[in-house]
Image: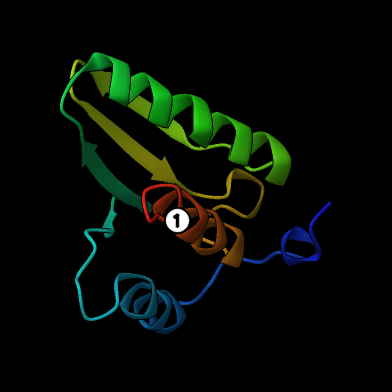
Amino acid sequence: MNPIHQNRRALSATEIVTQLTQLNGDAAQGWKLIDGSLEKTYTFANFHETMAFVNALAWVAHQEDHHPDLALGYSRCNVRFNTHDVGGISVSDFFCAAAVDALLKA
């Protein structure tokens, strides 16, 4: 297990805002805090691209043993992270959100 996921705890509101600002950066990459979760919608040209992204995301989630909720359609995928066992948002959520963003940076 990645050490980042050990000894997790729910982050405070201040920590979440700080981490969210760092995650989004100057480009405002689109991660938002919605109903106690980190959430972002990715858009694609077609279903094939959407599914390729979902499959890559599934591999990352499996490797990290930290799995998001997904909602997808023909040309979009909504990704939602929170840490159920701590009852909030943890560093694992931010780590995995950054890893998902990295899938599209090549």
Q: Position of residue 104 (x, y in %)?
A: 37, 48
Judged from the image, the secondary structure of the residue bearing numbered disc 1 is helix
Q: Is residue 58 above or below residue 30?
A: above
Left or right of 14 on screen, residue 24: left
Left or right of 23 on screen, residue 35: left
Pointer 1 local density, CA inside 10 Å: few below 14, some 14–19, many at least 20: few
Query: Number of labelled discs?
Result: 1
Query: What coloring was used for the rendering?
Result: rainbow
The residue that mark 1 highlights is 102
Please name the residue shown 30% across and 71% down the image.
Answer: 24
The quarter of the picture where residue 19 lies is bottom left
Outermost residue on the front side: it is 106
Q: Is residue 53 above or below residue 96?
A: above
Q: Which one is in front, 44 or 72?
A: 44
Q: Of the residues shown, which amino acid type is indicated by label 1?
A: Ala
Left or right of 18 on screen, residue 1: right
Q: Position of residue 52 (x, y in %)?
A: 41, 24
Assign the C terminus to one quadrant of the image: bottom left
Please name the residue shown 31% across and 49% down the image.
Answer: 39
Please name the residue shown 35% across and 72% down the image.
Answer: 20
The quarter of the picture where residue 76 lies is top left
Please name the residue shown 66% across and 47% down the image.
Answer: 85
Q: Is residue 41 above or below residue 96?
A: above
Q: Which one is in front, 100 or 16?
A: 100
Q: Position of residue 14 (x, y in %)?
A: 40, 84
Q: Position of residue 37 (x, y in %)?
A: 38, 51
Left or right of 35 on screen, residue 100: right
